[in-house]
Image: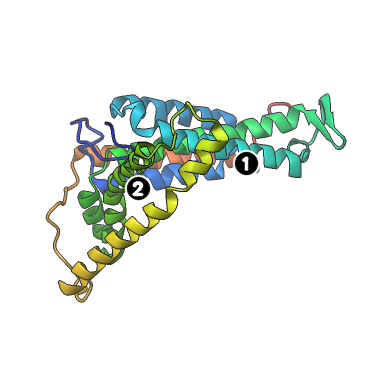
Amino acid sequence: MTKLLSYTDKGTWIHRLSGSTKLIFFLLWCVTSAMTYDTRILLIMIAVTVTLFALSKTEWRQISAVFKIVMFFMILNVVAIFIISPYQGCSIYGSKTVLTSFLPGHAVTREELFYLFNVVIKYFTVTPAIFIFLVTTDPSEFAASMNTIGIPYTVAYSVAIALRYIPDVQGDYRRIRNAQQARGIEMSKKAKLSERIKRTSSIIFPLLFSAMEKINIVSNAMELRGFGKKKKRSWYAYRKFQAADYIVLIISGAFCVWALWFTFRDGSRFWNPWG
């Protein structure tokens, strides 16, 4: 069974990049996505992430479940924005074109729909990048890379352990779910959605107890070995920068600078197609 969000070396050029390169690219990507509301830039970013997703040979099964959760929260966010501030798009773009009435004080406007469309595609610029980053980066190599760019090795090692425990938590979840089903508790698609949610939530506490026990074991082992007492440490899994790393960093930095310049060249980060 395919593990979600777990690292698998598939030999692509993305997998061979240094963890530092992928971290810097991801940070630049997030900054660009957060700063711009220019639809043209966001669509270019989506095209790039889809291309990288294909080049990394990431399987949909690795991210499908988590992607559905992210999309669920995205829908909640969009609905909340519309309910709380139904005319935010109108104030941003300086016009109000009512398409249809919806609720008292909540007419559907062209400007609000366009604003919400930009909010939605922002998710699609960052979310695939997160998945690609997680499934193409060796946790040990990533920790070493974080330490080389100035992040304390205690923090880097904590991140590496967290990434390594994702498959373990998934395995514990499956074992607990299978045990529940063996006792006659239906948790498959045959049960109603409300019942599945209720029964799945009952797995959280055994899963938390299992995770806490593992954390205690690991922390005791690290403490006994004197982890964190010295300022520096050596790394077994360290990948030096290659030509591809420098090329990716140059292209990423250039794109970030260009995208922000293109966004703010008229003094606003919102692109107004009607202005």
- Per the image, the residue denoted by label 2 is 24
- Corner quadrant of residue 146: bottom left
Asked if 26 appears above or below 52 in the picture, the reply is: below
Are the residues flagged by discs 2 and 1 in contact, CB closer than 8 Å? no
Per the image, the residue denoted by label 1 is 77
Q: How is the image coloured?
A: rainbow
Identify which amino acid the numbered label 2 is placed on: Ile
Q: SS of the residue at dot 1?
A: helix
Badge 2: residue crowd in 10 Å (few <14, some 14–19, many ≥20): some
Q: List x then y, in percent, for residue 141.
A: 20, 50
User: Which residue is pictured at 31% across the width and 54% down the height?
Assistant: 162
Query: Marks 2/1: CA distance?
Result: 28 Å
**Which image quadrant: the N terminus?**
top left
Amino acid found under the numbered disc labelled 1 = Asn
Q: Is residue 151 visible?
A: no
Name the residue located 75 percent from the left edge and 40 percent from the top edge.
Answer: 83
Mark 1 is surrounded, within 10 Å at the Cα level, by few (under 14), some (14 to 19) or many (20 or more) other residues, namely some
Residue 105 as seen in the image, left or right of residue 7: right
Counting from the top left corner in percent of width and height, residue 156 is at: 28, 59
Nearer to us: label 2 or label 1: 1
Q: Is residue 89 left or right of residue 18?
A: right
Disc 2 element: helix
Q: Quadrant of the C terminus?
A: top right
Q: Position of residue 243 (x, y in %)?
A: 20, 39
Which comes before the other along the chain, label 2 or label 1? 2
Q: Is 100 in front, or is 211?
A: 211
